[in-house]
């Protein structure tokens, strides 16, 4: 059977790259004595697939990993076993059994939701609340993307599904990250293999409209959720499957 494991990544672990996170889970699954299935061939490996890789320095409340197992006691048991051998900053928060026809986590990704804050003292001069409506009214938002084949111009406007600014009076300062009370943005953007828009690209494009550059290391970004597309609507990856 296939399991979909949702986990958080936070604290200093946010500076750990995707490949190291994969290696961590391979070791954690062995330490937890989960009856994971292995591939065939000369060099067998655990059968697992991750959703969209998280950039270094970002935290997340909605990361996903699919694994194939030969047997389990229960979904709760798998989650408790993983957390018992985990490290501070990585926490499994749900485990579900996937239906046979479910696509794997990586192939299913269509969009992702983020919370973006500016570090205190690195807020832009531009009044984002004032210019955001005009920015979203644009028919196209062009950015330059660097690829292995060189640079190309891309219109990211169709991939910005939602972008709102939180009212400053309703914010609470985040003691862990040192986030500023003044500017917090919530966005849902294209995260598919063909789009894959990064929050920093949107902020840079917005500020560039008014002749301002984003300061280095100015953003605190948290991925809140990852979505798949089902019947022309976005559905969180953990909405499919059952808890056994």
Image (cartoon, rainbow, N blue to C red):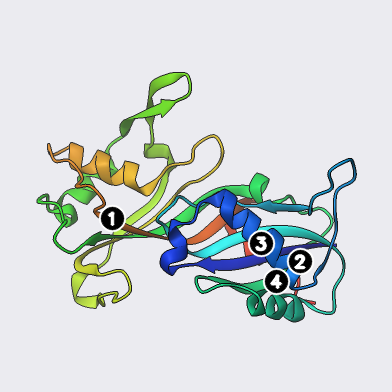
Which residue lies under the disc numbered 2?
A: 30
> Which residue is more in the foreground, 222 or 161?
222
Task: For residue 163, say whether it is visible.
Answer: yes
Q: Position of residue 228 (x, y in %)?
A: 61, 52
CB atoms of marks 1 and 3 within 8 Å? no
Q: Nearer the viewer, residue 157 or 68?
A: 68
Packing grade of label 1 (10 A; few <14, some 14-19, many >=20) is many
Query: Could you tell me how far apart the alpha carbons at marks 2 and 4 are, in whole angstroms?
Result: 17 Å
Q: Is residue 49 left or right of residue 209?
A: right
Q: Earlier in the sequence, mark 3 or mark 4?
A: 3
The tag earlier along the polypeptide, 2 or 3, is 3
Mark 1 or mark 3, whichever is nearer to me: 3
**Which of the two discs, 1 and 2, sits closer to the camera?**
2
Q: Residue at position x 23%, y 43% from top?
A: 206
- Rounded to the nearest whole Å, what is the CA distance between mark 1 and mark 2? 36 Å
Disc 2 is placed on an element classified as helix
- Check contact, mark 4 vs mark 1: CB within 8 A: no
Residue at (23% x, 47% y) in the render: 216
> Contact, CB < 8 Å: mark 2 with mark 4?
no
Real-space Cα separation, disc 2 to disc 3, in angstroms: 8 Å
Mark 2 or mark 4: name the one nearer the start of the chain. Answer: 2
- Which image quarter holds the C terminus? bottom right
Please provide percent x and percent y for residue 97. Answer: 78, 67
Q: Which residue is mark 3?
A: 25
Q: Where is residue 167? Give x, y as percent.
A: 22, 69
- Between circles 2 and 4, the one closer to the viewer is 2
Q: Pointer 1: what residue?
A: 219
- Label drawn at residue 95: 4
Secondary-structure class at tag 3 = helix
CB-based contact (under 8 Å), mark 3 and mark 4? no
């Amino acid at each position: 059977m296939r399991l979909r494991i949702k986990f958080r990544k936070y604290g200093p672990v946010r500076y750990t790259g995707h490949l190291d996170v994969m290696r961590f889970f391979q070791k954690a699954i062995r330490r937890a004595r989960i009856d994971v299935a292995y591939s065939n061939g000369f060099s067998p490996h655990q059968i697992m697939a991750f959703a969209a890789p998280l950039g270094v320095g970002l935290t997340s409340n909605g990361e996903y990993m699919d694994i194939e197992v030969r047997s389990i006691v229960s979904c709760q048991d798998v989650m408790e076993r993983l957390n018992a051998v985990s490290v501070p900053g990585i926490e499994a928060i749900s485990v579900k059994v996937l239906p046979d026809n479910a696509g794997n986590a990586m192939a299913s990704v269509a969009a992702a939701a983020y919370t973006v804050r500016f570090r205190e003292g690195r807020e832009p001069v531009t009044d984002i609340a004032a210019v955001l409506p005009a920015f979203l009214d644009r028919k196209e938002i062009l950015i330059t993307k660097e690829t292995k084949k060189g640079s190309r111009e891309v219109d990211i406007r169709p991939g910005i599904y939602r972008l709102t600014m939180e009212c400053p009076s309703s914010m609470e300062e985040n003691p862990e990250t040192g986030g500023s009370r003044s500017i917090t943005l919530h966005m849902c953007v294209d995260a598919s293999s063909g789009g894959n828009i990064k929050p920093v690209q949107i902020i840079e494009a917005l500020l560039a409209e008014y002749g301002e550059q984003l300061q280095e290391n100015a953003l605190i970004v948290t991925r809140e959720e990852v979505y798949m597309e089902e019947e022309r609507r976005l559905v969180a990856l953990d909405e499919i499957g059952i808890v056994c």
